[in-house]
Image (cartoon, grey):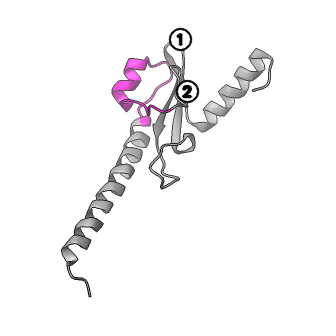
Amino acid sequence: MMKNPGKWLTAAFLLLLLAAGCMTEAARNVENSKRLRVGMTKEQVLSVMGKPVQEEFSTPDLWYYFVESVWTDGLTTEEECMPLVFENGRLMGWGNRFYSHWRSREVQTRGGVE
């Protein structure tokens, strides 16, 4: 028998809030991405999407936004994010399909292997 069920309920509630917060960020980013348009400036993208994740895989022309929880380790990984690609300060496209196509084109343009 539990001596203090209030503590367990409080802990369960806090875990639920934490999980809901992560889901809310992902859902918000997916919803906001529907307002993106090719050619937007970085400032316009920031006003629609907010700040991108600040991880080692982000660069000035490749931003990532958290869209899906794959791991429960509390870390944000590339596979949990949606990439946004910029060239000359303008949004070229977003999403994994666009990024893969863009990346293969970049490798071909440079004539090398990744």
- Occupied quadrant, residue 95: top right
In percent of width and height, residue 105 lies at 72, 23
Query: Looking at the figure, which quarter contains the N terminus?
Result: bottom left
Is residue 18 depicted above or below 47 in this figure? below
Residue under pointer 1:
88
In percent of width and height, residue 10 lies at 22, 67
Is residue 26 depicted above or below 6 in this figure? above
Query: Which mark identifies residue 93?
Result: 2
Q: Secondary structure at mark 1?
A: loop
Q: Nearer the viewer, residue 29 or 76?
A: 76
Q: Which residues are magenta?
A: 33-55
| Amino acid tagged 2 | Gly
Are there few (<14), some (14-19), or many (20+) residues within 10 Å of tag 1?
Answer: few
Q: Nearer the viewer, residue 58 or 20?
A: 58
Residue name at image x 25 percent, y 83 percent: 2
Are there few (<14), some (14-19), or many (20+) residues within 10 Å of tag 2?
Answer: many
Disc 2 versus disc 1: nearer the observer: 1
Q: Earlier in the sequence, mark 2 or mark 1?
A: 1
